[in-house]
Image (cartoon, helix red, strand yellow):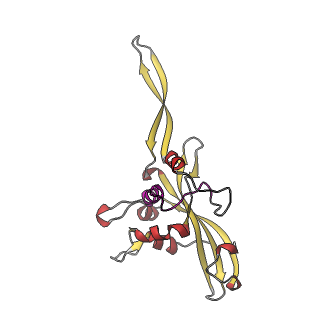
Amino acid sequence: AKKHLKEVDEYNVMFSKRVWSYVDFKEDLNKKLCNNSSPKQKIYPLYEILNLWITLGKINCFKYADFGSAKNIPITSSEFKHLSIKRDSIEERVIDENGAEKIIKSLKSDTLSNDKIVGFIVKEDWYFNKLSSLMEKKIIGFAPVIFDIKTQKQKELYWVYYPQCCEMLSSYQTFNPNGGKEIFTYRDFFLDRKSVV
């Protein structure tokens, strides 16, 4: 894990631990901070912002969280478009001209909108910094999570590398959980999050 702690002298790191945490949208505060929209205040859902920057080619997205692996190459634009479309097989009951009832299966395609996102999973390294005598964290990446109807399980849609997203996260604000008029960005949200180590 220490290879991810480049900004900290490894001699000052007493120990480090890989942590996977979850931002659950069932919690009202998480949903308000990450999946809410207020155009008047220029606040947009994090998932929509990610998709915009990925589409513009400003950041990459990956299939896995193993950044730096030769197998984990960036997802192509055509693969990303495929990820952004949800296809469901639906059954419809119809009556034919003879009055007989039939069940017809059809494939319905729909853009995967932010209301289908149930949360974000975050990959971090937590470490004890001897210099500051504090537990500190290095955010590695995060992924929007959806509920897959076919498998009846949650799954990551794609992964983004946090250091590549810092400019984007600093450019967009969300609601300030502390109240007041002070600007609170998506980067502030990730940095202020607490995790149990």
Q: Position of residue 13 (x, y in %)?
A: 68, 82
| Rendered position, 43 above or below 87 | below
> Seen in the image, is 149 located left or right of residue 128?
left
Q: Position of residue 138 (x, y in %)?
A: 60, 74
Q: Quadrant of the C terminus?
A: bottom right
Identify which residue is drawn at 49% across, 43% down: 86
Q: Position of residue 36 (x, y in %)?
A: 39, 60
* Region of the chain picked out in magenta, as a range: 46-64
Identify which residue is drawn at 65% across, 64% down: 68
Let me know if residue 121 appears in the view.
no
| Rendered position, 178 above or below 132 | above
Q: Position of residue 183 (x, y in %)?
A: 37, 75
The extreme bottom residue here reads: 131
| Rendered position, 183 above or below 83 | below
Answer with the quarter of the image where residue 71 lies.
Answer: bottom right
Identify which residue is drawn at 69% across, 82% down: 10
Let me know if residue 196 appears in the view.
yes
